[in-house]
Amino acid sequence: MEALLYYGLNQMPFLKGTKYKSLYRGEDTEQIESRLEYLKNTKGIGIITGNPGSGKTAAIREFTKKLNPALYKPIYIQMSSVSINEFLKMLATGLGLEPCYKKSDLFRQIQEEIQYQVNEKRCYPVVIVDEAHYLSHGILRDLVMLLNFEMDSKDCCILILCGTSLLARNLRQTNNEALRQRILVNYQMQGLSCSEAKEYIEHCLKQCGAKEPIFSEAAIDAAFKNSQGTVRKLNNLLSKALIEGASQEKRLIDEEIIKLVFEDSELM
């Protein structure tokens, strides 16, 4: 039986693209929001790290949604395993430019456009680099020079580097000391706690029309344990559990169904 109909939901609660009236706000969300708000007001460089699937990109996406488009211009770069020139060209394109061919011209072109945006339009570029743990040392080095305005006396841009803990390890290397010293905010995502996972599941189900509990307490505990507090893993596990529970016509999804779908996932 189809899960939506069987459990009386208006949409699947744990899938990418599900539209919630409000998002769940856990400790990670609160911490990232406060740090990025500070970065927005002061400008400069911020670092967000966490395990894959911990919700880094989702948190950044919510931050950009709230930016005033007249005052801030978000530029999202997700292809980070590229050469220096390719990275600069993506940045130039994000700024609305036709990228120059030579690196020196490209570098100057980007700096001049950022200064124009800030000085003439009073609009600050917000450059978000996802999967930033793949950035080469050459790109990290050039970012220091690229963000040097008026003899390093002014911040004209917001840069957010988002990646796994490997990003933090890369930045601790001696050759990245200049960039590391310029980092204003830094947050390592902790993932959902057990109590937060329960709140998160209840929140998502309620947002999708659930009128009564669908998962037993034991099922929620098992889902949290098997997902290790990682949002993406938890979402995948619960989505499969809803499908399996409906196929078995179980009104309350129990620990056995969680165990079954987890074992199936591990074999894939």
Image (cartoon, helix red, strand yellow):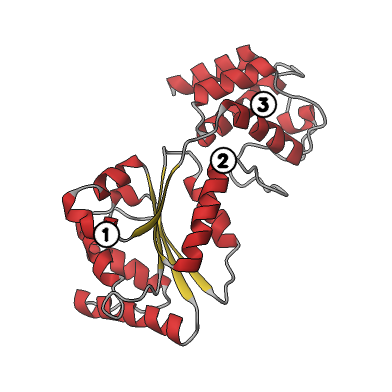
Tell which residue pokes out farthest to the top in this image: 256
Tell which residue pokes out farthest to the bottom in this image: 120
Q: Nearer the viewer, residue 39 or 49?
A: 39
Question: N-terminal of the two: label 3 or label 1?
Answer: 1
Residue 117 at x, y = what percent? Answer: 44, 81
Residue that carries the numbered disc 3 in the rendered image: 242
What element does badge 2 sit on? helix
Foreground mark, 2 or 3, reads 2
Q: Tag 2: residue type? A: Glu
Question: N-terminal of the two: label 2 or label 3?
Answer: 2
Residue 266: quadrant of the picture: top left
Foreground mark, 3 or 1, reads 1
Residue that carries the numbered disc 1 in the rendered image: 179
Q: As displayed, is residue 256 above or below residue 21?
A: above
Say if residue 74 shows up in the picture: no
Residue 85: quadrant of the picture: bottom left
Say how many tags the image has.
Answer: 3
Residue that carries the numbered disc 2 in the rendered image: 27
What element does badge 3 sit on? helix
Residue 162 at x, y = what percent? Answer: 40, 51
